[in-house]
Amino acid sequence: MNDHLAYVSDNRSVRNPILQFLAEKWYTVLYFWHSIIGIFIRLEDSPEGDKRPVVLVPGFLGRTLSWKSMYKHLSANGHPVYTVPLGFQVGNIRKKSKLLENFLIEKNIQNCYIVGHSTGGLIAAGLTYKGRDRVKKLFITGTPVKGTYLAYFTPIFISSWQSMPNSKFIREIGEVFEKLPNVQSVFTRKDQFILPSENSRLGHFDDVEFPEGGHFNLFMGPLGIECLFDLITAEENKDPKPIIRKVESSKVDQKMIESSVTHSKSFAATKKTNLKTSNSKKTAKSKQIPKKKSVPAKKKKKK
């Protein structure tokens, strides 16, 4: 009996291993290219939508541009979408968590879903109560929940030290994950950056195993995007966001405007009628007043 879930798509078939390998190579190149041009270009927030907002948190060396395909898919399906500019995610993860929290507060984002890839999942888990109160559910994908041995190859970065297995940070964040009631993990058994790949599992019954391989395929590939979107949709369907009927309110506003205009016109017409009546009365009075007869001037007698 499996102790986790397995994702099965209704629309897409799983690619063969060779295509998965080639696709992951392409996503890797694209990811690091986005890391470079992302210094100058970032995805703009898309606050419009009738569903709950989704906040996308990039991972190690990641930039907002890496989320472009996921961003478009969510936005097209009615979700307001926000991408968090956190730099390269090579510094202290706790400080990045504070930046994420400030972002949620400044943008006044509430009752949202957060999707964190790789280190982005650790950043999202580090929110204090001020940030957690604004999050409905956290989805982490390819996140080194128990650390990754690959971090030993990049010891020049603070986040690498924090991501090493059994580090103080990993132990503390593990306790946080155990207490979080609203978090779900997506992992793949063929993750070239999380070593071993099982370290990206929370150990919950609702952990989702992704059928294809690749660390970046988890959120950049079509099947990865579909998987994350389906999880968000399933959560949204449990408790749909109430939709404010703007049409009815606009009709009421239109009626109020029409009533106000009608009242103004009738008031103006009454005022005009009163003014005419007043003028006619004044004219009548002026006709009734008799004109004084002019008296001829007396001639002076000559002495």
Image: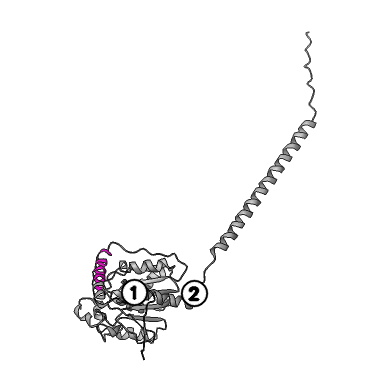
Of the pair 176 and 225, the residue shown nearer to us: 225
Q: For mark 2, what is the residue?
A: 240
Q: From where the camera sits, is residue 133 visible?
A: no
User: CB of mark 2 within 8 Å of CB of mark 1?
Assistant: no
Quadrant in which the C terminus is drawn: top right
Of the pair 183 and 124, the residue shown nearer to us: 183
Q: Which residues are magenta?
A: 24-38
Q: Main secondary structure of the magenta part?
A: helix
Q: Say few, some or many: other residues with alpha carbon within 10 Å of mark 2 (under 14 / 14 to 19 / 20 or more).
A: few
Q: Is residue 34 left or right of residue 291?
A: left
Q: For mark 1, what is the residue?
A: 223
Q: Amino acid at mark 1?
A: Leu
Q: Is residue 26 magenta?
A: yes
Q: Quadrant of residue 38?
A: bottom left
Q: Position of residue 299 (x, y in %)?
A: 78, 13
Of the pair 52 and 128, the residue shown nearer to us: 52
Q: From where the camera sits, is residue 286 visible?
A: yes
Q: Is residue 288 above or below residue 59?
A: above
Q: Position of residue 130 (x, y in %)?
A: 42, 76
Q: Residue furthest top?
A: 303
Decide which of tag 2 and tag 1 comes sooner along the chain: 1
| CA distance separating discs 2 and 1 | 24 Å
Q: Position of residue 100 (x, y in %)?
A: 36, 72
Q: Position of residue 76 (x, y in %)?
A: 41, 66
Q: Amino acid at mark 2?
A: Pro
- The residue lying at 28 percent from left, 71 percent from top is 62
Find numbered disc 1 in the image and state the secondary structure of the residue it sits on: helix
Q: Is residue 216 left or right of residue 153?
A: right
Q: Nearer the viewer, mark 2 or mark 1?
A: 1
